[in-house]
Amino acid sequence: MDEDLRFDGARAAQIAEFIEPLRVAPGRRVRLAEDFDPRYKADFLGKKDGEALLRTGIGVLAEYQRRLAAQETYGVLVCLQALDAGGKDGTIRHVMSGLNPQGVRVSSFKVPSAEELAHDYLWRYAQRLPGRGEIGIFNRSHYEEVLVVRVHPDNLDRQKLPPSARREGVWERRYREINDWERYLSDNGFKVVKMFLNLSKEEQRKRFLKRIDVPERNWKFSAADVRERGFWDDYQRAFSEMLSATSTAWAPWYVIPADRKWFARICAGAILAHTLIGIDPAYPEVGDEARRDLAEIKKVLEAEAPL
Ligand code: ATP
Ligand code: MG
């Protein structure tokens, strides 16, 4: 019998406790600047220990993924949001490194195409949802529809909406529609978990400078990112409102302190672990009859052994 590689009850409780301060309780009014410190890190954890912890954690995540895939009943959707240079790509690379690529699908969402704009605003996200047994990762997500689209309303103009969908209250309506959609997914076996990598303005400035100074990072730099930085306060407001309105019992938001990349990755790993522990996927049980069949087949195969 293989040993059980899952987290035991004590470890599961530690993980839950570790991520609890990051969770946005449903109905809580978030003011990002006051409520969440981008530089926060747990006192007991140093960088070295933290990285070792992440490595072991990833091995266990892989076991949960195998179970999830074998069971083919539940799916997981991870939504990652951040401002530019928030560390989405690195988080995906590090946290997902131990998972089986066959069971993970990363989808990145950019400025919508003409075809995408010819549909309802959730259409393109629905196309990329994970199947049962899969982990889907949205690098940017349907939340752009209440973030960049809100900060730059010309995006809304391009969405060809009927007047009734543009009227007063459009953001509240979108929050409700998103909550409903996620509830529907959750009710049907797809657990939605949302992570916001919360970066400080000063740390963003430093990361942009590094992208300019280090030649290998130049490709990552875009002047458009610096233009977006000019809208910092608008984004903070849009994020605060979005977090307040869309963290639900069935699809919680976690605000991850992102100024230290290593700590952010541990948080993301822990949140994914917590989600999978909650699902507790199991290998399908083989019934007595099937087991008898296996025993028969085994005999036949053994009898074929070369003398
Ligand atoms: P990278 O780390 O490579 O820069 P990225 O996610 O920032 O990754 P980009 O191609 O730089 O990718 O930017 C994607 C852009 O698409 C972002 O500026 C984002 O705000 C924008 N975008 C995403 N979804 C929408 C949307 N629904 N409407 C309008 N713009 C969107
Ligand atoms: Mg970018």
Image (cartoon, rainbow, N blue to C red):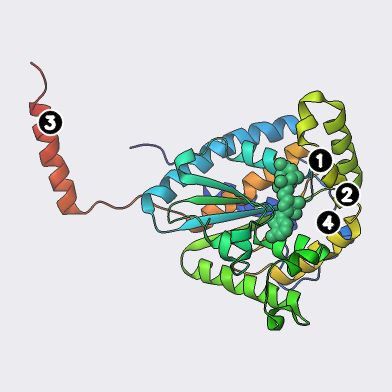
Distance from Cα at disc 4 to Cα at disc 2: 24 Å
Lower position in the chain sequence, tag 1 or tag 4:
4
Of 292 and 86, nearer the camera is 86
Whether residue 232 sits left or right of residue 12 in the image: it is right
Distance from Cα at disc 1 to Cα at disc 4: 27 Å
> Which mark identifies residue 227?
2
Whether residue 263 sits left or right of residue 113 in the image: it is right
Asked whether mark 1 lies closer than 8 Å to ligand 2, one says yes
Q: Can you identify the residue that label 1 sits on? A: 222
Instruction: Name the front one of labels 3 and 1.
Output: 1
Labels 4 and 3 touching (C-beta < 8 A): no
Lower position in the chain sequence, tag 4 or tag 3:
4
Where residue 186 appears, x then y in whole percent?
52, 67
The residue at 12%/38% (across/down) is: 297
Of 90 and 2, nearer the camera is 90
Question: For the image shown, how many numbered marks are present on the structure?
Answer: 4
Where residue 149 appears, x then y in whole percent?
76, 64
